[in-house]
Image: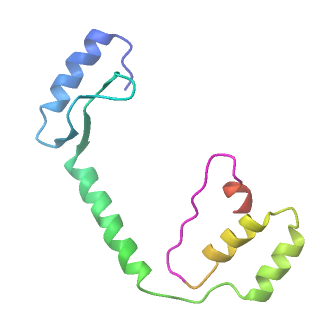
Amino acid sequence: RYVDNPAVFQQLLARIIQSPEVLRLQRDTVAFATGERVPARYTTRGLIRLEAGMALRSVWLAERETHGVPTKMLEVTFRRFSRLSEEQRTAIEHVAGSARIAAVVGRAGAGKTTMM
């Protein structure tokens, strides 16, 4: 599972990359801003199928609505957790709405976990 020996790691990597299941997403490149080498990126056919399925289901869900959390319930919750910021409250209203799928995006430490 873990390989500490760089030579063994390179041997295993070479074998893995030869698998028909592995696909290269990007060749080795050089970052223009830093001049540093950026290694190639790989994935598997299985992971691409999984991600494609997730994307299709997300689109399907986005086209449908269901019942949201009642406004009164949200108001009670916000009174109970008064320390939530306005931004957190807006995020809660978003995920508690009638959409079948919703996402909250924010930087680390912004309070996403706290609001959930």
Which residue is painted at 62% across and 75% down in the image? 94
Looking at the figure, which quarter contains the C terminus? bottom right
- Between 10 and 34, the one nearer to me in the picture: 34
Which quadrant of the rendered structure holds the N terminus?
A: top left
Q: Is residue 42 above or below residue 94?
A: above
Residue drawn 16% across the image and 25% down it: 15
From which residue to which does the magenta span run?
A: 99-110
x and y, in percent, of residue 102 in the image: 53, 72
Residue 89: percent from left, percent from top: 74, 70
Q: Most prominent secondary structure in the magenta stretch?
A: loop
Residue at image point 34% right, 22% down: 35
In this rendered view, identify the residue nearer to me: 105 or 43: 105
Magenta span includes 2: no
What is the x, y in percent for residue 60? 36, 79
Q: Nearer the viewer, residue 36 or 91?
A: 36
Relative placement, left or right, of 65 versus 54 is: right
Q: Residue furthest front?
A: 33
Q: Is residue 2 above or below residue 74?
A: above
- Left or right of 60 in this view: 77: right
